[in-house]
Amino acid sequence: MRKIRLYILIFIMSISLRIPSVCYAQINENVNGLLNAEVFISGNETAKKDIIDELDIRNESISNVLRVLSNKSGYSIVVEPDVKGMVTIYLQNIDVRDALRIVVDMNDLAYVEKDGFFSVMTKNEFETRFGYSFGQQLKSKVIALVNAQGEDMVAVLNQVKSKDGKIIYSQQTRTLALIDSPEKIESMSSLIEELDSPIKTQTFKLQFAKIDEVAKDIERVLTKDKGKVTFNAEVNTVTVVDTVLKLKQISKLVQRIDHQNKEVLIEAKIMQITLNDEHIDGIDWEAIVSDYQAISIADPKPDGKKDVISLGVVSDEDYEVLVDALDTVGVINTISNISRVTSGLEPVEIIAKSLEYELKAEQDRIEVDEDFRFFTIPNVAEDGLFIVRLKPEQISDVSSKELAEMLVEVREGSTIVIGGMFKNVAFEKTRKIPLLGDLPLLGFAFRNQRQSYHKTEIIIFITPRMVAKDTIL
């Protein structure tokens, strides 16, 4: 009994005097919750350090590891009964709590921090004492890398981990320490298993860039002593041998460089249809196109109907069928064909203006309603997919009115269709008796003139395509 009291006295005195070394006490009875516990009391508690510069452990008992942690950090650590295990780990510049978390998780243990010291115990003891499982929110796991580069892997995992998660890489042991929720740990472990796979080969086909434009960039990011690259100038391909993670990085690099050498070709066809009586209300675009949109261009009429511009997308095959089918709607005339190359920064202007044409030799157009103008700005979202921004305006000789902006997703080869722009065109029709109707002065007696109105619909087809930079049309 005297011996036990002496140990307790030494423990209390060592805390009070901050003795300049790590003291060890073996207590044989339950005294203030420290029954048979090992107590590591640091003499550096006045200068506690949360960051440990280095922890290099090779097959040591967990007691010795915790002793080292206490000495390096300045925190006192109590090791409770039944805490056993072996540790091999190398960590650098790590928070003492993260280090402790990794060490206890390696041996299926638990710890609690209270009043400036740590108490390490078994998970069963933790649950009995506190009523819940240790690490319900955060867990840790150490994974050794085989093929992938640690720095590259950390960059990828930082995009996956939660806000409270941490990724710690040891270059010396090529290990990753993951601290996060169980779900995140599982997903990151699966990702590491996928990316840390053996060396693989992948060939990249350059569509627009030349080999000499990508060669140096690829060689610079290859895994040292593992990655290899070969080029085939005849078919403009690049073949890379490297880890899966590095191949993914190089794939993005190649796409970015290849994209820098791309521009967007906007091909637009503007057509005007003089509607027949059967389709006098215009074409039902909602039933024809996909991704249908409608933009109001005027206040609702008394009957509740709205004048709208209709917009949608058709595939390459459907476009050909649609153009052929328009013959059944009325008389088709092509107003213009436009081809413009843009980097996507400057808009392509498309004006839907009525055609100055004659329906028959004796008819002359004399009046047209307002026209429409579209500023078209294409952006490449990914390979083969465009996000096209359309800014329409209703224009006349004296004014212009901006309409609601439209965004359209369209695959390369597909076509944006814009319809619903109606124009009432007035025609003056002349009838005459041959020869007599052309006589000077007397000819008006042998001819007559009459105005008639025809309803027309303007249709715009816009097709974006990728082309090589500096393409000349």
Image (cartoon, rainbow, N blue to C red):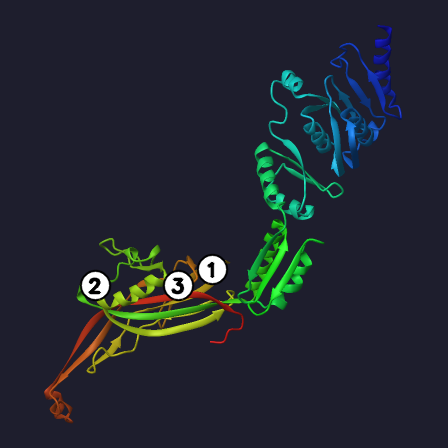
Residue 384, disc = 1
Check disc 1: other Cα within 10 Å, few if <14, some if 14-19, many if 20+.
few
Is 423 positioned to the left or the right of 86 in the image? left
- Classify residue 6 by image quadrant: top right
Q: Is residue 162 visible?
A: no
Q: Is residue 462 visible?
A: yes
Mark 1 or mark 2, which is nearer to you? 1
- Classify residue 457 by image quadrant: bottom left
Alpha carbons under labels 2 and 3: distance apart: 25 Å
Q: Residue at x 75, y 34 (%)?
A: 89
Q: Amino acid at mark 3?
A: Pro
Give whichever of 467, 408 is nearer the camera: 467
C-beta proximity under 8 Å, tags 1 and 2: no
Looking at the rendered structure, the secondary structure element under dot 3 is: strand
Give whichever of 274, 385 is nearer the camera: 385
Alpha carbons under labels 1 and 2: distance apart: 36 Å
- Classify residue 174 by image quadrant: top right
Q: Amino acid at mark 2?
A: His
Q: Residue at x 22, y 66 (%)?
A: 328
Q: Earlier in the sequence, mark 3 or mark 1?
A: 1
Looking at the rendered structure, the secondary structure element under dot 2 is: helix
Q: Taking 42 as reference, is 456 above or below it?
A: below
Q: Which residue is mark 2?
A: 279
Q: Taking 385 as reference, is 269 above or below it?
A: below
Residue farthest top in this picture: 1
Q: Which residue is mark 3?
A: 392
Is 438 positioned to the left or the right of 305 in the image? left
Give whichever of 65, 5 is nearer the camera: 65
